[in-house]
Image: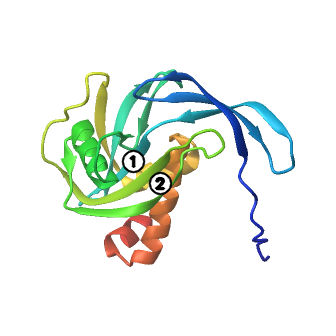
Amino acid sequence: MAEDNKAIAPWEVLDSTYNYSDRWLALRSDTVRLPNGRVLAPFHVIEQPDWVTAIALTRDGSIVLVEEYRHGAKQTVIELPCGVHDRPGEPLAAVQRELREETGFASDDWHPLGSFFANAPRMNNRVHCFLALDASKVAEPAPDDGEVIVPHEVPFAEFLADLQAGRRVLHGFQNGAMWLLLLYAKSSGDKRLAALLA
């Protein structure tokens, strides 16, 4: 099926107001005119810094995960190490820092998997995903003051089986990172990944 490449014109912003803003997020309310002439008011947008997430695999075939209470979901979850990219520098430096702070793990073998919008209709930020191969523990975790985190090493095959059976639930954007891992594994020819995903 051929794609229709007709460009859709961007919405025209007639007015814009910030209702709330701090270092973590800003809530912007726009009045916009669509290409068909319809006016939407308000259309809310959440502005946030970019996010980073790490798929860290150890030499013995485990994945490094973190357990943390997530207040939005009102439950404790075990997930991929991730964080906010809110400091100067490349996303790779941010994800390396997050992995080390949250888990004490590090790697000398990093691969960018790609990036995508966190939620394009309402949010302006992107998620940058990275793969760390042959990750190993080099220090004790040193989480931020607002974090209480327990690191876990789970055999990768068990982790995948739990995902497929619904026994483990990731953030939506972390499922996107897993999809990028699958695509990377198929194209890279890396024997370590082929063995894990066989």
Q: Residues within 10 Å of mark 2 (few under 14, many from 20)?
A: many
Q: Nearer the viewer, residue 2 or 160?
A: 2
- Relative side of 150 to 19, left or right: left
Residue 44 placement (x, y as % from top left): 66, 31
Residues at marks 2 and 1 touching, judged by CB atoms closer than 8 Å: yes
For the point 74% across and 38% down, the residue is 32
Q: Is residue 45 above or below residue 187?
A: above
Q: Is residue 133 left or right of residue 198?
A: left
Residue lying at the far front in this picture: please name it: 14
Between residues 53 and 77, which one lies in front from this camera angle? 53
Q: Quadrant of the C terminus?
A: bottom left
Q: Please, what secondary structure does the residue beneath circle 2 have?
A: helix
Q: What is the distance, in whole Å, between disc 2 and disc 1 at their CAs?
A: 8 Å
Other-residue count near label 1 (Cα within 10 Å), few / some / many at <14 / 14–19 / ≥20: many
Q: Quadrant of residue 8?
A: bottom right
14 or 27, nearer to the observer: 14
Who's the residue at 28% across and 37% down the image? 151
The residue at 86%/41% (across/down) is 38
The residue that label 1 is drawn on is 53
Residue 103 visible in rendering = yes
Figure quadrant of residue 30: top right
The amino acid marked with disc number 2 is Ala
Q: Amino acid at mark 1?
A: Thr
Residue 82: percent from the left, percent from the top? Answer: 37, 42
Q: Is residue 127 left or right of residue 148?
A: right
Most foreground residue, 166 or 105: 105
Secondary structure found at label 1: strand
Q: Residue 43: x and y, percent?
A: 71, 33
User: Which residue is label 2 attached to?
Assistant: 177
* Type of colouring: rainbow
